[in-house]
Image: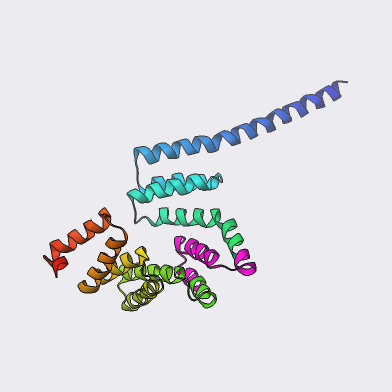
Amino acid sequence: VDRVAGNGGEDSRRTWKGAAVRIFSTLRPGRALRQLRQAARKRPSPETIGAYAERFIALGRLEDAERTADAGLGRYPASERLMKVRTFTKKHRRKEQIARLRKEMKEHPTPSVYSQLAEIHRELGSHEEALTICTECIEKFPSNENPYLLMGEIRLTSFIADRIAHDGLEAERELQRVVKLNAQNLKAHLLLGQLYFLIGALDPMQTHMEQALALSPGSSEIEEFLAKIDARVPGLRQL
């Protein structure tokens, strides 16, 4: 009887110990998270905010990790650590969406499906993949303006970053295709205006910005842009 009781006591102690380990294991992540949050608030930097966001990833809280990284990038936009966290979380959160769109693209391809998938890849920084999807969309739906617009936007972004002439020429070509297909495309006119301003082509810049203003009368954003141009080139809008 003593032996049985002894074994029972040992089993009880093991059960309690196992429960205690499980309880403390759930408490430690919360404590570590609080410490990292306090560090990020008291001593904000790419390192402290990055560590805080990475802890969310370890806990499987990808939405919180992405939100934390976005907030950090608002303060430290050049932080590679925060950019990596954001890219990682976005890719993993969008895996299901990408898989669904790829399946739709194979079974029931439409310009909208192509555009959504290409936009996701552009957002994730996978520009070459986005361009490939746009090219495939153009082959199937050559009269749809959306893939040209996205390609033009990607090329313009690259041109602004690296000032490579080829990117500027490609951006102009794709955006001009958009306005030929749809002269009412406001975004294409705005992007062309920006491109022509960057290369000093003021006449076509003025044309596209005025067209954008006609499509969106009273737009404070467009008026502010044109006001800055007037300050640099007095009387341009009266020419």
Q: Is residue 157 magenta?
A: no
Nearest the eye: 123 or 29:
123
Residue 89, position as x, y percentages in the image? 50, 53
- What's the magenta bit mostly, secondary-structure-wise? helix
- The single residue placed furthest to the left in the displayed view is 234
Q: Which residues are magenta?
A: 103-132
Give the image location of residue 199, x and y in percent. Answer: 24, 73
For the point 20% across and 72% down, the residue is 202
Q: Can you say whether 77 is above or below 3 in the image? A: below
Give the residue at x 52% y 72%: 137
Q: Residue at x 69, y 33 (%)?
A: 18
Q: Residue furthest top?
A: 1
Q: Position of residue 64 (x, y in %)?
A: 49, 44
Vertical placement of residue 151 versus 221, above or below? below
Q: Is residue 142 left or right of residue 212?
A: right
Q: Quadrant of the N terminus?
A: top right
Q: Which of the image's four quarters has the C terminus? A: bottom left
Residue at x-position 28% and y-position 68%: 208
For residue 109, which quarter of the picture?
A: bottom right
Q: Is residue 92 left or right of residue 83?
A: right
Q: Nearer the viewer, residue 115 or 78?
A: 115
> Residue 110: x and y, percent?
56, 67
Instruction: Say left or right for 225 vs 71.
Output: left
